[in-house]
Image (tube, helix red, strand yellow):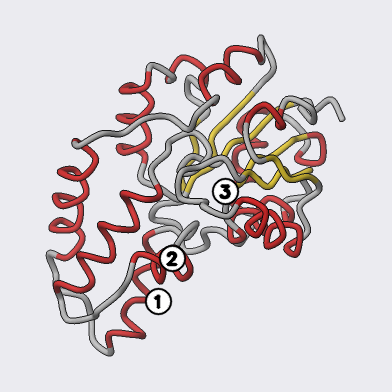
Amino acid sequence: MTPAAIIFDFDGVIADSEVRANRTLAESLTAIGLPTTYEECLRDYCGHNWQETERRIVVRLGRPLPHDFRDRHRERAQKRFAEGFAPVPGAPEFLESLGRLPRAIASSSSPAYIAASLDRFGLARHFGRHVYSADGWARGKPHPDIYLAAANGLGIDPAACLAIEDSPTGARAALAAGMTVIGFCGGGHILDRAAHGDVLRGVGVHHVAHGYDEVLLHA
């Protein structure tokens, strides 16, 4: 297909952030008495906005989170990300190759984090004002709302959009929005790309790409 626009997830698709993010969350949860592994965080929280993540944590913890949990977690994350943080391999080159093709970000992460990361990578110019965040929304991914908002912001029919997603949660959201979806397996958190591709195919993605060189075949 030749899409009318491409809508990108952010973490694991533009920012190679999922290893640091999920290790940090595991540390933060363990510190409040909920022993949690990195692998469990990837499995249970990846792709969700903070509101859904907090709901899931509270159910397992059996009590509300400490009032300063998110602030303390954010401080821990900032220290870990300062150790080294980069785009997903091939993402900058892929964005350069798109020319004038409309594009947007549809993410579960906070607007401030996305903006700071894009600035750090020198990629903000590729998206301009078309950065959409479901942080703070009652319905994040896997509901289609954030992808529909991105398509609406671009002024393009969702059915004409190509979405690039690395998580099953996000892929479900883009599919529910009626988009063609590439399941992306190029982030550093995906160690077994074949197995993760099978998981994404099971969700219903239309194509699987192990890296941006393969996305080019479908975009």
Q: Which residue is mark 2?
A: 45
- Along the line of sight, the residue nearer the viewer: 70 or 122: 122
**Residue type pointed to by label 3:** Ile
Q: Position of residue 166 (x, y in %)?
A: 58, 49
User: Which numbered dot is residue 164?
Assistant: none
**Residue type pointed to by label 2:** Tyr
**Residue type pointed to by label 1:** Arg
Q: Identify the residue at image location x=69%, y=17%.
A: 101
| Nearer-N-terminus badge (1/3) | 1
Q: Identify the residue at image location x=79%, y=31%.
A: 218
Q: Is residue 72 above or below residue 110?
A: below
Q: Which residue is mark 1?
A: 56
Label 1 and label 2: CA atoms lie apart by 8 Å
Q: Position of residue 185 (x, y in %)?
A: 60, 45
Q: Are marks 1 and 2 in contact (CB under 8 Å)?
A: yes
Mark 1 is surrounded, within 10 Å at the Cα level, by few (under 14), some (14 to 19) or many (20 or more) other residues, namely few
Tag 2 secondary structure: helix
Would residue 32 be found to the left or right of residue 108 on screen? left
Mark 3 is surrounded, within 10 Å at the Cα level, by few (under 14), some (14 to 19) or many (20 or more) other residues, namely many
Q: Identify the residue at image location x=60%, y=20%.
A: 94
Q: Nearer the viewer, mark 1 or mark 3?
A: 1
